[in-house]
Amino acid sequence: MKNLDKVVVITGASSGIGEATAHLLNEHGMTVVLAARRIDKLNEIIASLPDPSHALAIATDVSKSTEVQNLINQTIEKFGKVDVLFNNAGLMPLAPIRDGKVNEWEAMIDINLKGVLYGINAVLPTMEQQHEGLIITTDSVAGHEVATNGAVYAGTKFAVRAIMDGLRKEEIGKGVRTTLISPGDVETDLFNSTSDSKLRDQIQQIEQTAGLKPMDVAEAVLYAIQQPASVGVNEIIMRSPNQEF
Ligand code: NJP
């Protein structure tokens, strides 16, 4: 196994895909900065990493631009650089538009969409100065196709795909690469953010029977990071072979 001397900031690192990615990258010699709101959970995860001395937990709410900026500032202060930002925090409260769950729409827009923009904004000046950097964002198959009862979630994920593609174009020649990872169902706690109990049970059932494992997505993140600076892996779409959507 080749050890990679990289500093990687991971949002949404307190469970699921982010947690698995923190383990895998740390196992490959990388320094991982874990960000999420549940700091106790982040500290527990750090204690379980292969090399906790190369890890740091920073309580961060990605819907607050100042907290995201603080996350990047603290990372640079402590480790002197940031090689990779993995914008992964998200939630998926599915419901028909007709139900008018305005608070849930706002949360999805603030976290899934504005959270990604805040991350890009916080890290871009440093990456341009380094003339090297990689911004990876967890999108979704719902960023390519709209499911019934998932219009607003899909709206945030379509928008993230547009932003990441625009960013790729703007950063040509500046050394900053972009990767959009669009998984299908993954067996995580994501279903918990759906307040409609019937829909929540359906999603949980699908994720547990036809879902990818969080580590499958972590492997895609590792693949993107392992490429040389001359190779940008711009998009990865991955599904379990048991999933249609
Ligand atoms: O879900 P889960 P996943 N500020 O619930 C964090 C996408 N995706 O790993 O703050 C900061 O285990 C939360 O931390 P905490 C999905 O859209 C998934 O599946 O402590 N962090 C936790 O660490 C999302 O973008 C599937 O509560 C905030 C993490 O987000 C990404 O995968 C399919 C936050 C959520 O972990 C990771 O989700 C797909 C905030 N304000 C795309 N709010 C799937 N699982 O099926 C939440 O296509 N978090």
Image (tube, helix red, strand yellow):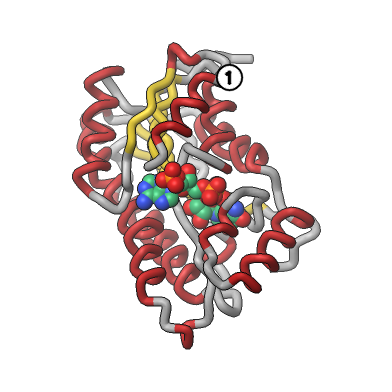
Instruction: Identify the residue at image location x=33%, y=36%.
Output: 59
109 versus 182 height, above or below = below
Residue 20 in view in this figure: yes
Q: Is mark 1 within 8 Å of ligand 1?
A: no
What is the residue that sits farthest to the bottom in this orientation? 98
Amino acid type, label 1: Glu
75 versus 114 height, above or below = above
* Image location of residue 52, percent across then percent down: 48, 15
User: Label 1, on which residue?
Assistant: 27
Q: Residue 223 or 67: which is nearer the viewer?
A: 67
Residue 88 in view in this figure: no
Instruction: Identify the residue at image location x=48%, y=68%.
Output: 153
Q: Residue 172 or 208: which is nearer the viewer?
A: 208
* Image location of residue 91, percent across then percent down: 47, 57
Q: Residue 59 or 143: which is nearer the viewer?
A: 59
* Image location of residue 231, percent across then percent down: 49, 36
93 versus 171 height, above or below = below
Label 1 Cα crowd, 10 Å radius (few <14 / some 14-19 / many 20+): some
Instruction: Identify the residue at image location x=50%, y=26%.
Output: 44
Left or right: 159, with 170 as reference point: right
56 versus 135 height, above or below = above
Instruction: Identify the residue at image location x=22%, y=48%.
Output: 65
The answer to which image quadrant residue 142 occupies is: bottom right
The C terminus - image quarter: bottom right
What is the number of callouts on the image? Answer: 1
